[in-house]
Image (tube, grey):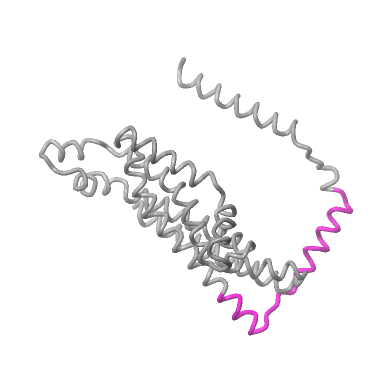
Amino acid sequence: MTSRRRALLVLLGIAALVLASFATLDLRWAEFLSPDALQKMGAFGASFFPPETSANFLRKTVQGAGETLAMSLLGTLLAGVAGLAIALPASARGHVVARSAARLLLNVLRSVPELVWASLLLVAAGLGPFPGTLALALHTTGVLGRLFAEAIENAAPEPALALRVRGVSSPKVFLWATLPQVLPQLLSYALYRWENNIRAAAVLGVVGAGGLGQTLGYHLSLFQMHESCTVLLAMMALVLAVDGLSFLTRRALMR
């Protein structure tokens, strides 16, 4: 079977799954787009404005944004280190038993959502940013570990082989032959996950893990819509800032 035919079969399979999804889900577009529903959504959205701009609340919002940023940054950093450590045995170049165990661990870590990790850790560590940071680190370790392992597998083997035949040890082979090839890709993956973890950290705060999410959950539960609007705007500004910084950094790495 030619590659073109295989690609066509894959596309047909995806199209069949999409059609099956529309057929099996109860999508009530008529009710969702009815004038009454649109009017209610518009009224609810208008209730958020104007945002709360008192100095005391803005100071509290900035503090929450800093906490969310710190959670996402530290969680991504911990995940990057742990993910790389697990990616080495998880790559195809590792031992069969070690590779299977490492891949199983990565599958478990990334299969459990951040909210579940946060709920488990909140029971042990209580409310605050500490369990939220650990929850981000655990889930992101599974994601980055898998991506790092694939990057290591796809690295050109010739430089590593040239060092091995000269009797260079495996750690030095990785540091001097494999890592320089994959480092820009690893950093790009880590930066992208940092962007995602900004959003995830905000969501985790809703269950009591600190940051802007906890502030948002508190004010929404009291129907304080103007305060909620200010927090949402802070989330958007934080995401845009991190996205911009990450984009510039990745572009500089790829040059």
Residue 42 lies within the magenta run: yes
Residue located farthest toward the right when viewing the structure as drawn:
36
Left or right of 102? Residue 125 is: right
Residue at 32% across, 46% down: 182
Residue 254 in percent (x, y) is at 36, 51
Q: Residue 253 location in percent, x, y?
A: 35, 55
- Kindly give the residue lying farthest to the top in the view shown: 1
Q: Position of residue 87 (x, y in %)?
A: 36, 44
Query: Magenta stretch containing residue 139, yes or no?
Result: no
Quick one: which residue is furthest to the front in this view?
A: 124
Where, by quadrant of the figure, is residue 119 drawn? bottom right
Q: Please count the marks in the image.
A: 0
- Give whichever of 100, 45 is nearer the camera: 100
Magenta-drawn stretch, dominant element (helix, strand or loop): helix
Q: Is residue 191 left or right of residue 197?
A: left
Position of residue 132 relative to residue 83, above or below, is below
The front one of 50 and 70 is: 70
- Residue 165 x/y as whole percent: 12, 36
- Residue ID at (45%, 17%): 2
Note whether 41 is above or below 67 in the view shown: above
- Give whichever of 32, 107 is nearer the camera: 107
Task: Report which quarter residue 212 is drawn in.
Answer: bottom right
At horizontal 42% and vertical 43% (from top left) the residue drawn is: 146
2 vs 22: above or below: above
- At 69% from the left edge and 69% from the top edge, which residue is drawn? 218
| Residue range of the region highlighted in magenta in the rendering | 34-63
